[in-house]
Amino acid sequence: MEKTQRRDKALVVLKAKKPEVTGQLLSDIRLMIEQSRHRVSQAINSEMVLLYWNIGKRIREDILKKNRAAYGEEIVQTLSVQLSADYGKGFTPRNLFNMIRFAEVFPDRQIVHALSAQLSWTHLRDIIYLEDQIKRDFYAEMCRIERWSTRTLKEKIDSMLYERTAISKKPEKLIKHELAVLREENRLTPDLVFRDPYLLDFLGLSDAYSERDLESAILRELEKFLLEIGTDFTFVARQKRITIDNEDYYLDLLFYHRGMQRLVAIELKLGKFKAADKGQIELYLRWLDKYEKRAGEESPLGLILCAEKTAEHVELLQLAKSGIRVAEYLTELPPRELLEKKLHEAIRIAREQIAARQIAGKNPERS
């Protein structure tokens, strides 16, 4: 009885005092809880992806051993019925075939293990049915590096991002090498970052607009613009003033790319790319390199966004040696068939030019 009274008295005193919980304490504990939940979620996702890969590998081995396609259909249907009864709807015939496909197109367990830490099964389901391994590797690694949502991944695939990158225009051997470097070192190269053309249909520009209208529209839709040019870009300045010999110049847009660790200057051109555009942005890049580049950063790069360009101008000016890229932008999207045809033709021409330069290099007397 006496013990009960003492306890009740202590509770009354405790309620009366009601010690205040500081906002910082509550904030810190909430952060700890959220971080822990995130780690648990990542661990569960990783285990599930690896489980699905192992299941697909095991079923595939059994089907290949029997060497009968019809047997594959039968075993998957039978397994689905039995596994669904035991473990639920995650083991439908369709999902089991997804697992088999996953193990088939990503046979290296080490690569799968690395992807499983950051890509969900939904991400991987969209990637595994792409038509060739280079594309699958590209989207898997870029998705991992830039942390795309599943919705963003689908948008990138639908907009033919791979075909619009500079890397797609290289020989297959060089593409595989750059993707291997990205996988092993998490290092993005300009050929993985820059695209051509850029799809700016979200700007909502009418038929008649000025360079200032284009610039303003980009800043108004900055979030969408960053999603199009790459999530590692950070906006730095608009109309950056550059003073040389008491003369002022104004750079349209200045960004910083965290992955490449370098400033990126963007000049907007309404019309066709001209040779004089190279001199203008080259001047800006040299100024940025001298006055704005910080310790540990790479030399700045330049991107000229224009309504139209010609391949011969770009080739003869050897822009890449000056750290300059030229790309077209589209404010209205053409039908997908036309865009696909245009991109595939650009890839074909670029690869033919590379092959011609390689032949000329081996046979200098013919050049």
Image: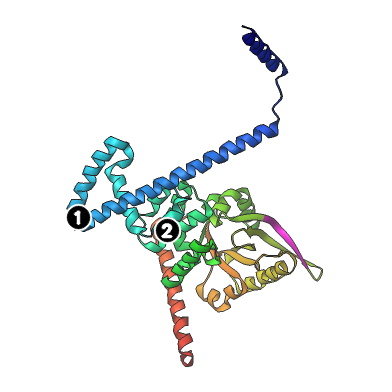
Magenta span dominant secondary structure: strand
The residue indicated by pointer 2 is 110
Residue 261 in the image, given as x and y percentages of width and height: 63, 62
Residue 54: horizontal and vertical position, in percent?
A: 34, 51
Percent of width and height locating residue 314: 55, 74
Select label 2 or label 1 by which is in front: 2
Q: Is residue 51 visible?
A: yes
Residue at 62% in and 66% down = 302
Q: Nearer the viewer, residue 111 or 129?
A: 111
Q: Is residue 160 left or right of residue 320?
A: left
Residue 220 falls inside the magenta stretch: no
Q: Residues within 10 Å of mark 1 (few under 14, many from 20)?
A: few
CA separation, marks 2 and 1? 28 Å
Compare residues 205 and 339 and report the one nearer the observer.
339
Give me the residue at 46% from left, 82% from top.
358
Indicate the position of residue 108 as horizontal and vertical percent values: 38, 60
- Position of 50 with respect to 100 (left or right) is right
Residue 349 in view (yes/no):
no
Label 2 sits on a secondary structure element that is: helix
State the mark number for residue 280.
Answer: none
Q: What span is in magenta?
A: 236-243
Along the polypeptide, which appears first: circle 2 or circle 1? 1
Q: Nearer the viewer, residue 222 or 97?
A: 97
Residue projecting furthest to the top: 1
Residue that numbered label 1 is attached to = 69
Q: Residue at x 18, y 56 (%)?
A: 66
Residue 242 shown in magenta:
yes
Q: Quadrant of residue 303?
A: bottom right
- Name which quarter of the figure residue 264 lies in: bottom right
